[in-house]
Amino acid sequence: MRIVVIVFAALLTLGLAAFGVVAAQRASAPAAATASRAPAATSSLRTMLMAAPATPAERPSAAAQAAEPATPASPAAAASVSEPATPAPTRLAQNAASPPAAPAKAAASPSSAAPNPPPATAIPPCDKPDALGLSRIVQIDTTGGPAFGTEHFKQYDFLREKEVVLTFDDGPWPENTPMVIKALTDQCAKATFFEIGEHATWHPEISKMVAEAGMTIGSHTWSHKDLARNPYAKDIEQAKKEIEMGVSAVHMAVGGPIAPFFRFPDLQQPPQLLEYLGTRNIATFSTDIDTFDFKMRKPDDVVKSIMTKLAKNGKGIVLMHDFQHATAEAMPEILRQLKAGGYKIVHMVPKQPVTTLAQYDEMVRSQDKYSSSNNTRPESSVVKTISE
């Protein structure tokens, strides 16, 4: 009996030992498998963490990123700025801090674009910093023949305090008119010239010079006749002829458009002729300030006359004569004193040019005693330089 118990105990011990070995082997297998997979899992997790965007708590704000000092770019990087680099995934505010894109090439810069010519009513640039210059350009619509100049016409008083319109009668005339134009040009100033038709036919090169200087040109009859006296006072057709031949002659001398501006000689303005000018859409100009410079022989007297009357009147359309040598000599000082006195120059321009009438154009042509009906070919086909 004792032997049976010993054998049973031994078998039980062996069974328990065998069970322990199997259990141990089963327990060690999962651990080994897990241990063999750990490096791969760790690597995948690191990759996921690196690729994932930062959480809101970890991501810097846009303001903070914009405040970060930029790393100075190398010359090579600057040269390749048109080739953008791949942005870092976490720098989401980088675009907000990037500089604005360059303008499209189609939009040319002002320096490279061809400048547009300024409109006729624009104040031209002045390259003289201390010049008097222009303060304003006024466009006159001459429809219906409006009349200006408060000495005779009160309705259209368009000048502001200290504003001056310079006007000149009786030109063009050699030496004097060019002197006046030079003085005005030196000060970047403009004026209106009421030219006598006959004078313009005698000196068309001066009329052209006045126009090329940017001045406004009107007319002042054909031969400076007082149209309020006979025979013109009794014969309106003769008066019209005096007016219209003057318009045609000045237009021919300039060789281009002139203003529908007219001034009566001696400021004598018969009502029937004012009415006629209205039908022609030609404006009449009297004056605000008559300098009476035609009575003066000294430039200083001309300067004194205009400045004294301006001080009293405060502004005005000023009547002078580029035919007068004293006036031509006085012009630089007149302009200097106008600037010193705080006066401003206003330039008048027409809305539309004057239209001449064919019958009076022909009358002006017939005044040329040396014209020939044979002279119909252009000069270039008649005269040719063959040696020089």
Image (cartoon, grey):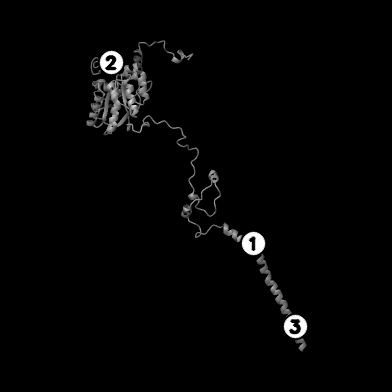
Q: Can residue 19 be seen in this view?
A: yes
Against 63, residue 12 (above or below) is below
Q: Disc 1 and disc 2: Cα gap in Å?
A: 118 Å
Query: Which residue position is annotated with label 1?
Result: 40
Mark 1 Cα within 10 Å, few/some/many (few <14, many 20+)?
Answer: few
Q: Position of residue 301 (x, y in %)?
A: 24, 24
Q: Position of residue 188 (x, y in %)?
A: 34, 29
Q: On the rendered structure, is 153 left or right of 353?
A: left
Classify mark 2: helix, strand or loop.
helix
Q: Disc 3 and disc 1: Cα gap in Å?
A: 47 Å
- Please state, as top left, top right, bottom left or bottom right, where the N terminus lies in the image: bottom right
Q: Which of marks 3 and 1 is nearer the N terminus?
A: 3
Q: Which of 102 and 365 is in front in this view?
A: 102
Camera-side mark, 1 or 2: 1
Q: Residue 238 has which mark?
A: 2
Q: Which of marks 3 and 2 is nearer the N terminus?
A: 3
Q: Which of marks 1 and 2 is nearer the N terminus?
A: 1
Q: Do the residues labelled 3 and 1 touch (CB within 8 Å)?
A: no
Q: Residue 211 has which mark?
A: none
Say what amino acid the circle numbered 2 marks: Gln
Classify mark 1: helix, strand or loop.
helix
Q: Residue 10 has which mark?
A: 3
- Residue at the spot x=28%, y=21% of the render? 325
Q: On the rendered structure, is 116 left or right of 245?
A: right
- Residue at the spot x=75%, y=81% of the render? 11
Q: On the rendered structure, is 4 left or right of 83?
A: right
Say what amino acid the circle numbered 3 marks: Ala
Say what amino acid the circle numbered 1 marks: Ala
